[in-house]
């Protein structure tokens, strides 16, 4: 019995392959499995190629997985377009549409011999049982239920619910298509069984959601009452979540005329005393930088979510990348520290988004949440989260004594000044992008500027001691180390477990706080390290360079970086760790040479 | 809304001493604003006054209120966020011709179509004052400035037609040539329930042309009221607005006799309608339970 299976399916837009993935994920959740689903599209709006990966496991899942265990190709042109996103290996069972006319021995996969290749007349079965080829995806779900034991009951239960409104006839047609798929699988057993073991958590409630919806829910939980933004893939669903829900909580959402107006309105709402946010992706982040600088100097709390995609410019709008790191840390001119946080999964998007609001409110600063396309649009099954564990922080409001001769930017011990808002008697002041004295009055004094820059940057010192914004796993004294963040962290967590199982003495640091760089945390972490990798989806090794800018990394720590849209696979990271180990051993042998 | 008690113009004057050039038209504008606010009587802490960047954009600093001297061209986006976050506030936005009709020009149409209840005052001096005399979007064709040494080759924007064309519910013009009239016009704009626009011909004594100084403005000014203009007639307003640049029509060009509901009011309605559907926040993740 298998504990874990990775499915990858591709077809053209009309094939409903993504909706099949959704059904599979929901069925798996209903049967108590853990699941992760990612989807990927060509750039056409409709009818282009589309694909999904669904990973199902009896234990919690760290990432969408590496090589496919099961590949489903409704046609080969579309499947091949996804290249490294759907990697087939010698361990993969390949199922494909017989109507492609390609022989099982001649499938167009270069350089691999899959475990087993099966041509299935999927379209013909759909036509015969349901009267339409549109039921192809249901046939596929039947095949999966038959061969791998997932969703035999739950899939059709889900489909029934989804199609209930469309009439019993359609439901029955799908049932026939599903049964036909299952029967085909039963009649053609796999060479080696690949059934998944039953889940131990069968019957427990599971949530299913993606990173964008999770971010929206977390923001509302954190007390956000205003969203201003402009649609851009892959961040738009956050705004959509707000348009569905924020009114109920007395808040508002504005689809603005552009990204500048979106963040501008959020700045205004924050000035008016409300927790506020905006969300965007690469090009929008570029547009927002002037306003981010304004929020920094006016010391206004604000959360900016940037769901990264391939850049620069329009780049790869539907693919994931981590290359906005520099822009997040450094965009907006002047001497600015602006905290940057990054979630690593759908589940921790909840915590990290709340953290972003707390930090924004406490430090009176814009904070960037650097999500990425993969986390934002992948769906995860989740165990229920106990929300009572999260503390919500509100900005420091002036006490009565502060409002006597009120000074908005008063120098205080921790550099944080009580902040009033319109409507508060005695609290009127001038907020400004121009340098100002403690009262808010404009100045062009160099001395004041020096002092205010001190105030606006030193206030973040305690943030760098927030060890809870870093996760170290593996052996804390290991000589071999990895650093990874965002969606790449999940791949590295899995690689860590695999490497440890192979006896490697290795550890992993996952920073949730990317900027300001917490030098002490990294120095402690690297103290034991002789060899290491900073692993990231950027072409320029931005993370590696950001760290080097702030710390002296041990000599043996190098970069493993590449552009987005080519996901890292846990196996390749383990292989890289093995290389580090042998380098380490070689250098030790060197040390053991007798000295002349 | 709080009870209005008596306020005088001086109650809205802040402690900051204006650093405008002596004689700058903006001195009159800020006086007009103090008077209008006193007539309305909202206490300073219930007023938010947002501007962009420019000489004119310094104006919130000289006014006692919650001021926000933001970045160039973005007073309106910020002002709308304030109004949506707290519709009880009286929200003013102000700035220059460059701030409003060049860098920030894209925002005006959207504030108008949303009809957010904000009053927007442009101090139109047909020049970039703060940056020392460059061509502005309202400078007339042929104007010689330091960025148009041989005369500008482009036509000016007509701010009045611009906002009328987008459907603004209240459009007026004022000038320091008639301070009492200016104060009354600003007051009427603030009282108008919806987006209201006041273009103020405010001379730049340092970089402005001779013809645009007080004397020149007086020579071409005409009161719309005295002309017998009916401010409920939008087409007549557009007709008169065509003369922007040659004539200085003072007063209300257009005031919608049936103001549309404001965006901020609609937001409130929606909040009230949907509040009963709110899951307690601590249970918000129940939204993701697939039954
Ligand atoms: C993004 C940006 N671009 C340019 C400037 C420089 N700048 C400041 S004010 C201004 C124009 C001012 O003209 P106007 O808005 O008409 O105001 P006035 O000074 O005439 O009152 C310019 C170009 C700036 N501050 N920010
Ligand atoms: S430069 Fe012109 S607009 Fe600016 S303060 Fe002087 S007179 Fe006024
Ligand atoms: Mg000007």
Image: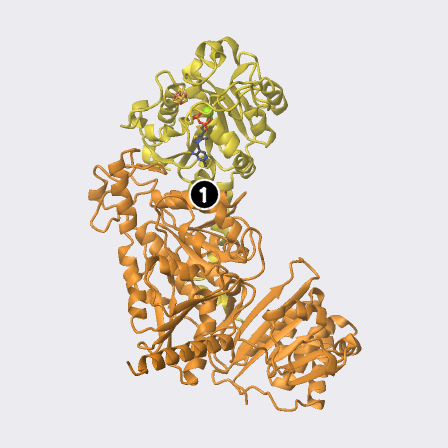
Q: Is residue A375 visible?
A: yes
> Against A211, is A332 above or below?
above
The residue nearer to you, when weighing A380 against A519, is: A519
The way the protein has been coloured in the rendering is by chain
The residue nearer to you, when weighing A558 against A355, is: A558
What residue is pinned by disc 1? A264
Q: Quadrant of the N terminus of chain A?
A: bottom right
Q: Is residue A514 visible?
A: no
The chain assigned the colour yellow in the figure is: B
Place of residue B127 in the rendered image (x, y in percent of width and height, measured from the top left) = 48, 22
Viewed as shown, does residue B203 lie left or right of A455?
right
Viewed as shown, does residue B55 lie left or right of B171?
left
Viewed as shown, does residue B153 lie left or right of A594?
right
> Against B144, is A533 above or below?
below
The chain assigned the colour orange in the figure is: A
Crowdedness of circle 1 by 10 Å Cα count: few (<14), some, many (20+)?
many
- The quarter of the rendering in which ligand 1 is drawn is top left
The residue nearer to you, when weighing B29 against B87, is: B29
């Amino acid at each position: 019995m298998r504990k874990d299976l990775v499915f990858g399916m591709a077809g053209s837009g009309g094939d409903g392959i993504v909706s099949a993935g959704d059904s599979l994920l929901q069925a798996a959740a209903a049967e108590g499995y853990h699941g992760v689903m990612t989807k990927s599209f060509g750039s056409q709006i409709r009818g282009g190629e589309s694909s999904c990966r669904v990973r199902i496991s009896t234990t919690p899942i760290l990432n969408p997985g590496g090589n496919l265990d099961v590949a489903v190709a409704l046609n080969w042109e579309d499947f091949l377009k996804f290249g490294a996103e759907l990697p087939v290996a010698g361990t993969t069972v390949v199922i494909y549409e017989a109507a492609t006319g390609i022989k099982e021995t001649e499938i167009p996969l270069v350089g691999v011999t899959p475990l087993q290749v099966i041509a299935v007349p999927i379209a013909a079965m759909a036509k015969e049982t349901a009267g339409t080829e549109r039921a192809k995806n249901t046939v596929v779900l039947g095949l999966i239920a038959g061969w791998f034991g997932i969703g035999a009951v739950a899939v059709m239960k889900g489909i029934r619910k989804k199609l209930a409104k469309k009439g019993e006839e359609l439901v029955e047609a799908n049932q026939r298509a599903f049964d036909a798929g299952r029967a085909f699988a039963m009649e053609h057993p796999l060479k080696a069984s690949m059934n998944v073991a039953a889940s131990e958590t069968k019957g427990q409630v599971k949530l299913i959601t993606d990173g964008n919806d999770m971010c929206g829910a977390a923001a509302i939980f954190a007390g956000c009452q205003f969203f201003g933004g402009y649609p851009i893939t892959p961040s738009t669903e956050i705004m959509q979540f707000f348009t569905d829900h924020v009114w109920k909580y007395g808040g508002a959402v504005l689809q603005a005329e552009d990204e500048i107006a979106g963040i501008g309105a959020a700045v205004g709402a924050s000035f008016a005393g409300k927790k506020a946010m905006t969300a965007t992706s690469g090009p929008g982040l570029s547009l927002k930088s002037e306003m981010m600088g304004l929020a920094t100097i006016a010391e206004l709390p604000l959360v900016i979510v940037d769901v990264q995609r391939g850049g620069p410019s329009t780049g790869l709008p539907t693919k994931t990348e981590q290359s906005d790191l520099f822009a997040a840390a450094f965009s907006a001119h002047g001497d600015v520290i602006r905290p940057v946080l990054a979630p690593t999964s759908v589940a921790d998007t909840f915590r990290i988004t709340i953290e972003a609001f707390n930090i924004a409110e406490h430090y009176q600063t814009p904070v960037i949440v650097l999500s990425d396309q993969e986390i934002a649009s992948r769906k995860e099954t989740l165990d229920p989260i106990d929300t009572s564990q999260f503390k919500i922080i509100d900005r420091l409001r002036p006490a009565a004594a502060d409002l006597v001769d009120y000074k908005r930017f008063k120098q205080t011990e921790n550099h944080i000044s009580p902040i009033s808002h319109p409507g508060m008697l005695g609290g009127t002041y001038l907020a400004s992008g121009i340098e100002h004295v403690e009262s808010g009055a404009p100045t062009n004094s160099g001395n004041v500027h020096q002092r205010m820059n001190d105030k606006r940057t030193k206030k973040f010192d305690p943030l760098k001691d927030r060890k809870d914004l870093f996760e170290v796993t593996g052996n804390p004294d290991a000589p071999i180390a990895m650093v990874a963040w965002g969606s790449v962290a999940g791949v590295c967590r899995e690689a860590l477990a695999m490497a440890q199982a192979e006896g490697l003495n290795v550890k992993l640091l996952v920073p949730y706080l990317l900027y300001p760089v917490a030098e002490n945390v990294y120095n402690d972490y690297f103290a034991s390290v002789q060899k290491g990798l900073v692993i990231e989806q950027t072409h320029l090794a931005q993370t590696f360079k950001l760290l080097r800018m702030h710390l002296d990394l041990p000599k043996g720590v190098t970069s493993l970086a590449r552009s987005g849209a080519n996901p890292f696979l846990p196996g390749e990271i383990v292989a890289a760790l093995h290389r580090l180990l042998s380098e380490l051993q070689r250098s030790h042998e060197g040390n053991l040479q007798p000295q002349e | 809304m709080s009870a209005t008690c008596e306020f005088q113009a001086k109650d809205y004057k802040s402690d900051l001493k204006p650093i405008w050039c002596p004689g700058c038209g903006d001195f009159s504008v800020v006086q007009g604003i103090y008077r209008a606010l006193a007539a309305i009587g909202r206490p300073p802490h219930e007023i938010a006054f947002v501007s962009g960047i420019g000489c004119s954009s310094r104006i919130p600093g000289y006014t006692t209120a919650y001021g926000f001297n933001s970045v160039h061209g973005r007073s309106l986006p910020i002002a709308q966020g304030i109004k949506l976050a707290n519709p009880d506030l009286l929200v003013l936005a102000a700035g220059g011709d460059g701030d409003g009709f060049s860098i920030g020009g894209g925002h005006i149409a959207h504030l108008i179509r949303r009809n957010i209840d904000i009053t927007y005052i442009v101090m139109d001096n047909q020049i970039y004052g703060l940056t020392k005399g460059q061509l502005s979007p309202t400078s007339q064709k042929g104007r010689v400035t330091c960025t148009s040494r041989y005369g500008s080759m482009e036509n000016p924007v007509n701010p009045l037609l611009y906002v009328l064309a987008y459907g603004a519910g209240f459009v007026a013009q004022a000038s320091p040539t008639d301070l009492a009239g200016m104060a009354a016009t600003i007051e009427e704009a603030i009282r108008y329930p919806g987006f209201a626009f006041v273009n103020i011909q405010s001379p730049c004594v340092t970089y402005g042309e001779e013809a645009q100084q007080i004397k020149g403005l007086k020579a071409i000014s005409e009161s719309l009221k005295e002309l017998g203009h009916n401010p409920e007639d939008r087409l007549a307003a557009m007709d008169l607005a065509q003369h922007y640049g040659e004539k200085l029509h003072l007063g209300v060009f257009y005031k919608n006799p049936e103001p549309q509901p404001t965006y901020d009011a609609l937001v409130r309605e929606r909040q009230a309608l949907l509040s009963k559907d709110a899951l307690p926040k601590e249970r918000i993740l129940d939204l993701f339970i697939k039954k």
